Amino acid sequence: MGYDWSRPPLTPILPGRKLIGPLKDMATEVATTSAGLERSIALETARTLGERLRLVNSYYSNLIEGHKTTIPEIEAALSRKFVEKPDRRYAQELCAAHVLTERQFMEDLGNHPATDVCTIEFIRRLHEHFYSHLPEEHLSTHHADGFTGIPVMPGQLRDSEVSVDGATRHGPSALDLPGLMTIFHDTFAPDAFHGDEKLIAAAISHHRLTWLHPFRDGNGRISRLHSGLYLARINVNRSNLWSLSRGFSRNKSGYMLNLRATDSPDRTNGGMFFDEELTADFCRFFFEICLDQISFMKNLLRLEEIDRRIEWLVQTLIRTGQSDLAPEAERLLRAVFREGLVPRGRVHEIVGMPERTARRKVTVPLERLDLLKSESPKKPLSMGMPISALPFLFPSLFDPSIIGQEYREQSIV
C-alpha cells in the first residue's frame, strides 16, 4: 500500500506541548536518580555488579519471550556448558547470546561514545551479532510449537509480512521497511534531541522499533537491547546498575498492553501515524518502569544493608566449612565494596591482624572463593561476585525464582 509521505511517518516524534511537560519532569527524574545511583557506588564495584546484571537483563528479556532458565545455567552457557533438555538448552543459548551481545556493544560504545545507535547498519549489526552466538540448527524462526524451518536471516531486514497474533498484519509492509528504517534513524537519532527530550525520544523509539518489526525473528529482544544501548548512549545507566528488562518482565501484562495500545496507528495513509495520547501513555509507562527499577536498586545497595549481608555471607562460609577463613574477613569485604579498590598493603590494618596472618586467614581464602579479585598478586583488590555469593549479597534481586531453588539451597562452598 502506498503512503502519503507529505506527512512524516512514525509521528508524533514527541508529544505536543500539552502532554510533554509531565514527561519532561519524569525524564529529568530518571536521569537524576540514575546518576545518583551510579555515584553511590565505587566505580570498580559498579563495574563488577553491572557485569552481573547483564545476566539479569538476559534472563528477564528472554523470559518475556517465554524462554526460562536460571542465572547459573546462563553462566554455564557462557562457558559452553549446556543442559540436555532441548528447550532448556535453547533458553541457555538465547540468554548467553544476549549477554555476549550486550557486553560487546557496551564495550564498543565505551570506546566510541558518539556512536549513532539508530542507524540501519547499527541495528542490523546488533541482530547479526546476537544470532552469531546461536548454532546453525537454531537459526530458524521459532514459535510456541518449536522451530519453523524458516531461516532467521541474521542482520537482514525481513522480506515478508508478519503477524504477532496470527490474524492481523503487524507493522509496515516489508517493501516500505528499508525507507522507514532510514526515517527511524533520522527521527530518533540521539543527537537530534537536547536535554530531557533525549530520554523521551529513547522511550518512544522503543515502541517504534518494536512496531517496525524489522527482522523475521528476535525483534523484542533486539528492541530491548537497543533501548539499553540508547540509554547508555545518552549517559543514562552506563554502568548497568538497573535493569529495564527486569521491570518490563515483572509487569509483562502492562508492557504488552502499552505496546499494543500504542501499536494502533491512524489507519489513513496506510497506518503510519500514531495517536499522540497513546504515545505519551507509553512514554509514561516506560519512565515508571525506569524509576521503579532505580528505586529497587537504590534500596538494595544501601551500605548498611550491604554490611549486614556481607556479615551473613562470611558467617555462612565459616559455618559451612571454611575453617581457614577468619571472621575479620567481613571487614575487608566491606572496605573493598565501599572503596572499589584496596591496596594489599592496607589489608592487615583493615582486619587488625599481622600481615602474614591477614594474608593466610583473610586474603587467600577470599581470593580462592572468588570474593576478591586482582589483576596480579601485587595489584589492589576489588570485589568479586561469584554466582554462589549473589543470593547473599543481593537476595531480593537473585531470589530463588532466578537463581534456582535447588542452587540456592546448596552451600556456597
Image (cartoon, rainbow, N blue to C red):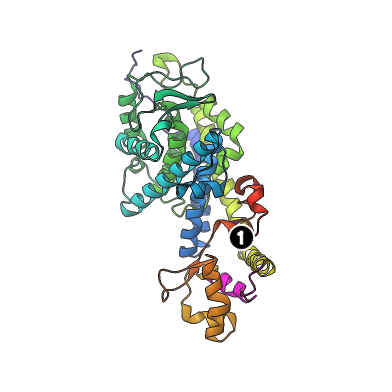
Residue sitting at x 47%, y 40%: 93
Residue 390 at x, y percent in the picture: 59, 57
Residue 315 at x, y percent in the picture: 68, 69
Residue count near mark 1 (Cα–Cα under 10 Å), binned few <14, some 14–19, many ≥20: many
Q: Secondary structure at mark 1?
A: helix
Q: Image height check: is 198 above or below 172?
A: below
Q: Image height check: is 124 above or below 51?
A: above
Whether residue 322 appears in magenta in the rendering, the answer is yes
Residue 72 at x, y percent in the picture: 55, 50
Q: Image height check: is 177 above or below 138?
A: above
- Of residues 341 and 407, the one drawn nearer to the viewer in this rendering: 407
Q: Amino acid at mark 1?
A: Leu
Q: Quadrant of residue 217?
A: top left
Judged left or right of residue 349, residue 194 is left
User: What is the magenta range?
Assistant: 321-336
Whether residue 30 appears in magenta in the rendering, the answer is no
Residue beneath disc 1 = 393
- Of residues 266 and 121, the one drawn nearer to the viewer in this rendering: 121
